[in-house]
Image (tube, rainbow, N blue to C red):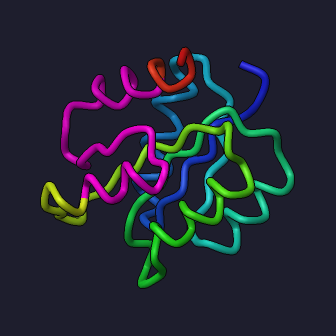
Amino acid sequence: MDGKILFVDDELEMCFMVSNLLRHHGYDVVTAENVDVALHAADTYPLSLIILDANLGGEDGFKLMTFLKQNNPDTPIIVYTGTPHDDADIKKVLALGAHQYLRKGAPLDELITAVQTALNR
């Protein structure tokens, strides 16, 4: 893996937990708690993967995802959110360029499997 994983979530506890989990599995991780920090990180580091929440403290994670996808078209994006979405919404997110959609609260090994799959595609 050449670049970092960018993990974007406004919940600092979630950033801490997931970044530590990913580091434990050997990944280089940078976290962002809002859109501005995420955009700065995307401009600063080569990214291998982006994991982001749909709701970033009132900011729209899907708009951020669209912008990041336009500027990093080859970087897979996993939407990892606690915000409930129906099947139609999930299909839209995938059509916008998300590699995968995962719900927070799912077993963490599902997130690790999604990361491995996205990086090995």
Check the image and name the residue furthest to the right.
44
Q: Residue at x 29, y 31 (%)?
A: 108
Question: Taking 41 as reference, is 34 left or right?
Answer: left
Q: Residue furthest bottom?
A: 58
Is 121 positioned to the left or the right of 30 in the image?
A: left
Looking at the rendering, the stretch of residues picked out in magenta corresponds to 90-115
Q: Nearer the viewer, residue 50 or 74?
A: 74
**Residue 17: where, in percent of width, then height?**
43, 43
Q: Give the residue at x 68% y 30%.
A: 28
Q: Position of residue 71 (x, y in %)?
A: 74, 56
User: The N terminus is located in which quarter?
Assistant: top right
Image mark count: 0
Q: Is residue 62 magenta?
A: no
| Residue 21 percent location from the top left of the image | 46, 30
Judge from the rendering whether residue 12 lies leftward or rightward of residue 29; answer left or right.
left
Q: Quadrant of residue 29?
A: top right
